[in-house]
Image (cartoon, helix red, strand yellow):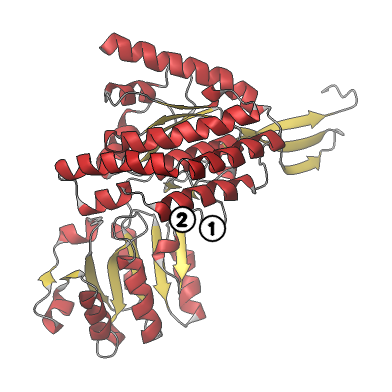
Amino acid sequence: MCKDIISLMNDIGLRARGAAHLLANAKSDTKVKALEAAANAIEKGRSEILVANKLDMEQGHKARLSSSFLDRLQLDNERVQAIVTSIRAIAKLADPVGQIIAQWDVPSGLHISRVRTPLGVIGVIYESRPNVTADAAALCLMAGNATILRGGSDSFHSSSAIHACFIKGLEEAGLPTDCTQIVPRTDRAAVGEMLSGLNGAIDVIVPRGGKGLVARVQSDARVPVFAHLEGICHVYVDKSADLEMAIKLILNSKMRRTGICGAAETLLVHRDLQDTHLLPILTALREAGCEIHADSAVHKMLSDTIPATEKDWKTEYLAPIIAVAMVDNIEAAILHIATYSSHHTEAIITSDAAARDQFFAEVDSAILLHNASTQYADGGEFGMGAEIGISTGKMHARGPVGVEQLTSFKYLVSGNGQCRP
């Protein structure tokens, strides 16, 4: 079995490497045609995709997967249409391949250009979100990269059905189907083979999933990784915050979808607001079904809250639970975030421009928001069409990873006979 998996994965890698060269030189119109055809195929294949997803959901319930996990796994007509819309949005983006990032002349008379190029072959390892199949395939295709997709066993049928539709788009555009491959087995050994790089076939790994998956990828991968380990996102309510706005934004940040990485997990409230804002905010959260873990100051005011421990500030709940702390000032809020944040997304609610500027300057996270919900931490909402993930690292890509972030660059140097003295 082990030799069989090694052989299978090496063959996938070899075919992806061959397809990557062809895709890197594909015309923009060809890539757009493939994406539009794939979107149409998914739209027409909606029934088959939903049947496959029903099977995954049934198995998920039998396996007693968490509610947040099942929410990420589930597809319905609206979510399938969102996949279609996302692919069509990516098709409308400017092709990044060949874009001139910068150009200049040097005293020797040479003209130098820095030009975007595809990364090559991207391996995407993900768990329960079947929409990642389409988003990753579409983004990588537009950026000129071949893709090897390895979805989780829990979403195997859904992901396979979406991938089959995507292949129809490649075929219609005349592109090799090896441009976008999905691992046809659920064996965990396939993940290990991908992390090894498949004998140099894979250039970058992107993990999408829980802490366990991402930690393993970051620990074991022998190729570069775009990843975030956790989404411990904070909302800080500054002393000048409008109460009505604060309630609206906090409810959306926490409760819109509790199982996504952009959901708020910690709420920090300026001490000056304890008599005006704190109780209405916490009441609104409770009425929405959110459990509150409170620090000592907040717990003294609301004794029926759950006393927070050190663990709460380090926890990505992915559930209707939020940790709440009172802070003396913006400096204390920034210090708390620096201590416990996963550097994913943080928000400040304030009408004070100076407080906003200080927050933006001093908080070191991939995404910072002012008077907006943390659930906007999404490539689609950023106008990128979609994202392959959100990177919290600082090398190459940070924040939503869209088509531009899925490229590297090379230098094109033109002369007229120069020899270096």
Which quadrant does the N terminus fall into? Answer: top left
Tell me if I can see residue 157 in this picture: yes
Query: x%, y% of residue 84?
Result: 51, 48
Give amino acid for label 1: Phe
Tell me if I can see residue 335 in this picture: no
Q: From what the image shows, is residue 204 above or below residue 367?
A: above
Query: x%, y% of residue 34?
Result: 61, 35
Q: Which residue is mark 2?
A: 378
Viewer-closest of 311 and 168 = 168
Question: Which picture quadrant has residue 37?
Answer: top right
Q: Which mark is residue 397?
A: none
Q: From what the image shows, is residue 58 above or below residue 217?
A: below
Which quadrant does the C terminus fall into? Answer: top right
Q: From what the image shows, is residue 323 above or below residue 101?
A: below
Crowding at mark 1 (Cα within 10 Å: few <14, some 14-19, many 20+): few
Is 323 placed left or right of 252 in the picture?
Answer: left
Is 294 placed left or right of 381 in the picture?
Answer: left
Give amino acid for label 2: Asp
At horizontal 47% and vertical 52% (from top left) the residue drawn is 81
Q: Which residue is mark 1?
A: 382
